[in-house]
Image: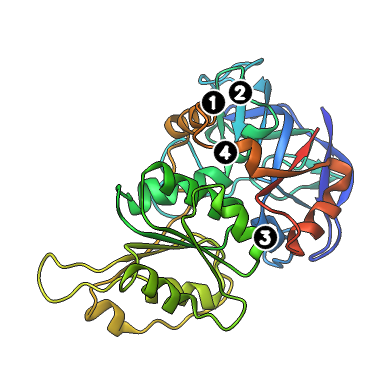
Amino acid sequence: MKTTAAVQTEVGGLLRIAEVELPDPAPDQVTVKLYSSGVCHSQLHQMHNAGLGRPLLLGHEGTGVVSRIGHDVTHVKPGDECIVTWVPRTPIRGPVGRQMTGAMFEGQAAHGHVYTWARDVQTSKELVVPIPAGHPRDLSCIVGCAVLTGAGAVLHTAQVRPGQSVAVFGVGGVGLSAIRAASILEAYPVIAVDLDDEKLEFAKSFGATHTVNASGNVDPVEAIRDLTGGGVDYAFDAIGRQKTIEQILQATRPGGIGADNFGGMAVLVGIPQEKVTLDPALFVYGQRQYRGSLGASFPDRDFAMYLRWHQEGKFPLDRLVTRRYGLEQINEACHDLHSGKILGRAILEF
């Protein structure tokens, strides 16, 4: 079958809206006709990554309806609504395989093990999660990355509990999801850190109790220590830049001597692009901890919970989505995201 997709043919180049050929699904593949897709900052990194093959298909969070299945697929059937994600339904230990989807562009195999900037996607059954009918076809797509990444880091990586203090550096779609999850779990205080006053004000509507603008003369680490009397229990970096990767460890509270006197935990959620330097004294003398969090949700279980939170008014997906584009506007969407013009999350609608 033929479909239309955003295709990148040169590293750093603009995306082309072009025809892509999809073969019959392999035994373990599913074809999904998409209703919507999120526009994630990770794709901007991929578009400048020379280590990825071209032509390249992009996007990794989408909502749609199953149109075809391979003969080994049993958890979905044609007509089922679903979310396409980048986190496998079955936990994978060790390196994750990157099997090509089989999509062809101008006679060449298109790279990318999953993609959602297209009218139809064909990918592994492990990346297709059924959802009950009746959930918003436009909003639910961002559960497939922004929500699962941010909320999952709070729920599962850090396991935040009521009354514990939280700081989140970077309040885009992932950071706002982390803030909202911390608020639902009754963390306090929940401190949002960013460089933009408009984004920080927006973060308050998602549950941030305090904000820190780090763009001026304010040292966010010192500000967080002042607000909390020494540092937070958990600090999350939803950006992945050298400075913030280092700051989140410094912003956590110290522990001390003894077997059960642990300090706070720094959690890196944003994809790192640079090398960092960490002071080992922060680990030894403060018994602080540093964790990475890579899509820390259980799709089969958590997606239904996140959607239920939205239905119950706890997690406002409708406010998290602030910009909408058509597929033909994908380059504009990427430019707006890179320029910092998007509060929350942008989506494509098909």
Quick check: marks 1 and 3 in contact, CB under 8 Å? no
Amino acid residing under circle 4: Val
Q: Outermost residue toward the left?
A: 258
> Residue 145 falls in which quadrant of the image?
top right
The residue where tag 4 is placed is 143
Quick check: marks 1 and 2 in contact, CB under 8 Å? yes
**What numbered label is drawn on residue 135?**
2
Amino acid residing under circle 1: Gln
Point 35% across, 59% down: residue: 165
* Local crowd size for mark 1, using a 10 Å CA cut-off: few (<14), some (14–19), many (≥20): some
Residue 117 screen position, x and y as percent? 76, 43
Amino acid residing under circle 2: His
Between tags 3 and 2, which lies in front? Answer: 3
Mark 1 and mark 3: Cα distance apart in space: 27 Å
The residue where tag 3 is placed is 198
> Residue 37 falls in which quadrant of the image?
top right
Quick check: marks 4 and 1 in contact, CB under 8 Å? no
Amino acid residing under circle 3: Glu
Q: Secondary structure at mark 1?
A: helix
Q: Which is more N-terminal, label 1 or label 4? A: 4
Point 68% across, 27% down: residue: 137
Between tags 4 and 3, which lies in front? Answer: 3
